């Protein structure tokens, strides 16, 4: 009892009292308002983005999610996701800065037609993500016969029903391309003058694709690249084709038209198709801007 008394007395008199675990120190309390203010500032600068899913395989959403930690950085710093079928429980569409639309529209489904028109009304910028939204892709070949809803037989790209501002073609687009467009869209809306100029140069070719209409196939590659003597035999078109409709013969693409699903992936991937010289000369600056934003 005497030993216990002496130890207890020494611990309470000679040593400053220790605070229980979980209790914040004065320093931690003082830094709390700074962290809160920083977070509020970041949230205030975010752009509102809605992800709208029409008729498709959800492969574009998977590609979007394949950005992994970079996706979390985008959602934490730059984007306020206001609607998404898989991530957000929102029954009504609200106004937004950008709407990313995946999939084509079934014109026999009145709800789908109304939803894509509402998307155009609520969004400042509409982005068609993937071959189905841009060009119809394989859904153009649907002729009904679904076991549960046989009346759904005609599917069209969203550009046939509404005005689309930006195309991100491919089946599916690469995670890097989706990521770059997200960052550049943020810089276009929230960046300084230099960043806005850089983002405009990056997004302009994708905007011109949207102005080019809703038809695409391997024939575009033949007429606009190969027949113009621009093909350098890199094989990017063959590597990007999701149905292996393009093979390289003697260093040049050979397109099997019967296999082509008209997704536009080959034309989108070709470095000699729609990307202009302004983009090529600004490649390093664009990469540095994206990397800096995601650090």
Image: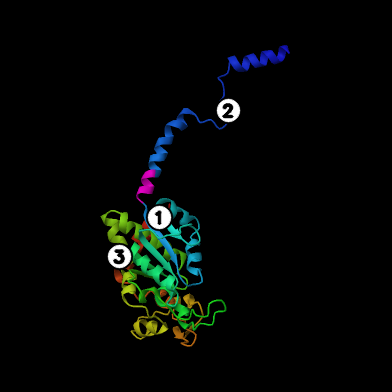
Q: Is residue 11 visible?
A: yes
Q: How is the image coloured?
A: rainbow
Report the magenta residues as a range: 40-45
Choose between 116 and 138: the one closer to the eye.
Answer: 116
| Marking on residue 201 | 3
Q: Which residue appears farthest toward the top when viewing the image? A: 2
Indicate which disc residue 195 carries: none
Quarter of the image for residue 211 reads bottom left
**Secondary structure category for the residue under label 1:** strand
Mark 1 and mark 2 lie on one chain; the one further toward the N terminus is: 2
Residue at label 2? Answer: 20
Report x, y in % for residue 222: 38, 85
Where residue 225 sits: x, y (%)?
36, 81
- Is 225 covered by the magenta stretch? no
| Magenta span: chief secondary structure | helix
The residues tagged by marks 1 and 2 sit, at their Cα atoms, a distance apart of 39 Å
Query: SS for tag 3?
Result: helix
Residue 79 shows which numbered tag?
A: 1
Q: Is residue 248 left or right of residue 198?
A: right
* Quadrant of the drawing holding the N terminus: top right
Residue 288, can we see it? Answer: no
């Amino acid at each position: 009892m005497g030993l216990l008394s002496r130890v207890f007395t020494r611990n309470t008199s000679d040593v400053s009292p220790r605070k229980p675990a979980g209790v914040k120190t004065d320093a931690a309390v003082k830094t709390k308002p700074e962290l809160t203010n920083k977070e509020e500032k970041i949230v205030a600068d975010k752009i509102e983005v809605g992800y709208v899913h029409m008729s498709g395989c959800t492969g574009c959403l998977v590609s979007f999610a394949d950005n992994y930690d970079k996706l979390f950085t985008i959602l934490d710093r730059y984007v306020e996701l206001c609607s998404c079928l898989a991530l957000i429980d929102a029954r009504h569409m609200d106004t937004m800065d950008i709407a990313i639309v995946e999939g084509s529209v079934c014109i026999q489904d009145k709800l789908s037609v109304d939803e894509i028109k509402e998307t155009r009304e609520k969004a400042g910028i509409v982005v068609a993500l993937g071959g189905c939204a841009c060009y119809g892709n394989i859904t153009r070949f649907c002729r009904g016969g679904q076991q549960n809803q046989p009346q759904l037989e005609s599917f069209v790209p969203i550009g046939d029903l509404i005005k689309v501002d930006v195309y991100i073609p491919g089946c599916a687009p690469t995670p890097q391309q989706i990521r770059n467009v997200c960052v550049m869209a943020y810089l276009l809306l929230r960046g300084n003058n230099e960043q806005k100029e850089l983002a405009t140069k990056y997004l302009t070719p994708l905007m011109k694709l949207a102005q080019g209409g809703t038809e695409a196939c391997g024939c575009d590659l033949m007429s606009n690249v190969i027949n113009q003597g621009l093909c350098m035999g890199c094989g990017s078109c063959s590597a990007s084709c999701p149905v292996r409709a393009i093979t390289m013969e003697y260093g040049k693409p050979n397109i099997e038209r019967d296999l082509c699903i008209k997704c536009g992936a080959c034309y989108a991937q070709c470095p000699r198709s729609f990307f202009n010289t302004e983009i090529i000369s600004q490649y390093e600056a664009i990469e540095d801007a994206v990397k800096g934003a995601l650090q």
